[in-house]
Image: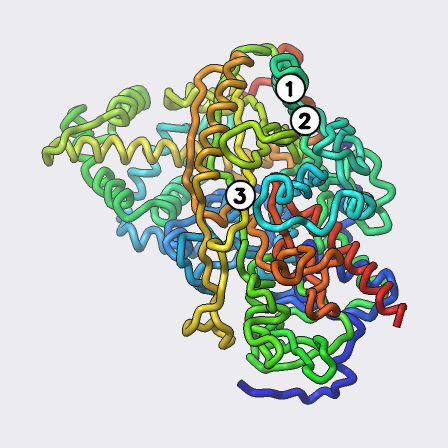
Amino acid sequence: MNRRHALRHIALISGGLALIPSCDFSKEDILAAYENLKITATQKALLAAISDSIIPAGEIKGALDLEVVDFILVMVNDCYTQENRENFTAGLQAFPDYAEKTTGKKFEALTTKEKEAFLLEAGALTGDDTPEGKRLSGIGYFLSSVKQFTIQGYMASEYIQTEIIPYSLIPGEYNGAVLISDLQKPRING
Amino acid sequence: MANLNLRSTQERTYQAIVVGSGISGAWAAKELCDLGVKTLMIERGPDVKHIQDYPTTNMLPHEFPHRGQLTEKIKEENPVISKCYAFREDAMHFFVKDAEHPYVQEKPFDWIRGYQVGGKSLLWARQVQRWSDFDFEGPARDGFAVDWPIRYKDIEKWYSHVEKFAGVSGFKDGIAHLPDGEFLPGYDLNVVEKYFAETMKKEYGGERHVISARCAHIHGNSEAFAAQGRGSCQNRNLCQRGCPFGGYFSSNSSTIPWALKTGNLTIRPDAVVHSVIYDEAKGKATGVRIIDRLTKEVEEFYADVLFINAAALNTNAILLNSTSTRFPNGLGNDSGVLGKYVAFHNYRARVSGEYEGHAEYTTSGGRPTSGYFPRFRNVYKQETDFLRGYAAGFSAGRGVGPDTSGIGMELKNNLLNPGQYGPWHVGSHMMGETLPKESNYVTLDGSLKDEWGIPQLKVSMDYDDNDEKMVKDYLEQMTEMFTKAGFTNIQTSDSKQAPGLDIHEMGGVRMGKDPKTSMLNANHQLHAVPNVYVTDGSSMTSTSTQNPSLTYMAFAARAAHHAVAESKKK
């Protein structure tokens, strides 16, 4: 069944049920997240800068344009266990000093290339049970969390799912043997 | 408790009362209404109207604040229901939260419940395989439980009756122990599933079948369902939110609106049934006593015929709480078996693997079902060191993902243009028959009560040695079959999950030939109170391996017609 036919079905069967979201509870969640995690304005700006490095703006919008930072904090606040929340905030707190000590500059002052190289390296940090080891693994944990939620928040954003790669509520009839070579997908330039 | 029966008895009298609006209750109500019977359907939860009460049905992924995930707070507050695969951000509102309706776990039991009009019919997995005499004859052949008082010939036409109305997609597979039915066009297996099915046929001399599971979805020709206001399944796989197309069968989309159209149905939501009223002088049940969920007021409703289809364990609870001088141990419980011989399906074990073959293929679109192994153990004769056997799910799928190792523009372009095809992933889960036994039971707690002053249900169910052997056999057999098919990286797991998470609890009000050892006769009537019918999961004498809902529907239709025929004799 094609999309037009399917939409006609919606109209016929569902009595013109509107395709709109039923509620908006996200603003309150965002405020609660900032409050519970005790995020300062400086830390928010830092998180935003990191998310911007992970998925920058280009031909299409990036993570900063979509305020993915709000999504990151809501997920950390609501879906992390207390232990993981604490690991995350500890990593966030340790990050600025570590960045400056490692690169000789504040993170914000690095060039794009330098930021990318530093984040890839720091995101893989692990450590032993010593206080210094825990500090390093905390930074690694923090950065891998930020990356994971940046990717999720960006790809599952309204912008991507309505304008760039429209999400289909009606995915169409199953084909259980599609030749990959027959698939033609236009390349999207980020 | 205030007793405010202000309305006249006449106003509260119907020809039939059905307790429960889930798959079996609403089906009984629909049949009764079609036959001209003025019916009251009582539901303990709030009303859920088709489409208008599906708040998340057309929401896009980004509209869920946690993109579908449960928050820690919800998980902490709901350790039981959070284990259910469908309890996610998009459908949480249709499940009972742990704190709302406490029960006593004498042994661990994850009780998954949906308290609303439509019950769990909004949430079910929609798999509908028929039983055969290899199932009905199980207890008699293998010497457990009691003999079923019915056979396939008694239920066959009712399977057809309900399949035609519900809409069942499937293929005529010609398997003696999984009878064909009234099918709409089936959903094809994919290229790897077909390969596996062919390999199994060759390797096991045609004795092991992998088929496309029959499912209660409208596929192909939907014209016959227009009268119900339902259309074709759109392959959305968002069924648990409620389907605006009525693409799958639920009470809400199908039997309830149909019954309402007859003008014979009254629905009373928010009414917690306290007990069935038994009139000692008349020697029959005359109605039910309910407590309003919100006001806590007590009210009574009366009818000539009662259907108690409150879902398996709650039907047990209602009958246990329906005591009288004649039945001090629960309605119709002369035998003492009420609440006992409960059983469930064993869903503990899984096997997964990968397949490097058919690398040039993938799939597109969606489908509401997947592959199915009908039981192949101990079907024609006893051949293992455990009784009975298991069915199994089987599916193959292939994901395409992006390389997320990088950062910046490289990462962004990879995310937007995923091109990494992994190997095919194959997976199977077992659906094992468990044996009903006296030591698995439910009863009412002596002191703990719920919000409405009704004793809490105490559940005591466990696995036994037969189940352990079956898990082991499933894991061995599936590993062998995966190996024969050339699958690699084969992983087995036993979740050891508690009974209940299968959501296939059954029994306690079992059917049987002998009133001394069973509760219900061959017509689904209480032996001792024949104007009370039970056709939900509690009536199951044994469990076999098939997803049971289709059988409850057929029972409900059959019993409703029996009740009407009986009333005409008078």
Counting from the top left corner in percent of width and height, residue B462 is at 44, 49
Q: Which of marks 1 and 3 is nearer the N terminus?
A: 1
> Which residue is painted at 51% across and 36% down in the image?
A156
Residue B374's place in the image compared with B21, above or below, is above
Whether A53 is drawn above or below B155: the answer is above
Amino acid carrying mark 2 in the image: Ile
Q: Quadrant of residue B7?
A: bottom right
Closer to viewer: mark 1 or mark 3: 3
Label 3 neighbour load within 10 Å: few <14, some 14-19, many 20+: many
**Sequence order check, earlier mark of 3 and 2:** 2
The chain to which mark 2 is attached is: B
Q: Which mark is residue A59?
A: none
List x then y, in percent, for residue A19.
67, 48
Residue B202, position in %: x, y? 65, 12
Q: Nearer the viewer, mark 3 or mark 2?
A: 3
Q: Which chain hosts label 1?
A: B
Q: What residue type is labelled 3?
A: Thr
Question: Do residues under tags 2 and 1 come within 8 Å of each other at their CB atoms?
Answer: yes
Question: Which residue is under mark 3?
Answer: B434
The residue tagged 1 is B197
Q: Is residue B106 left or right of residue A119?
A: right
Mark 1 residue crowding within 10 angstroms, few (<14) / some (14–19) / many (20+): many
Helix, strand or loop under label 3 = loop
Residue ID for mark 2: B211
Report whether residue A190 is seen. no
Residue A163, picture quadrant: top right
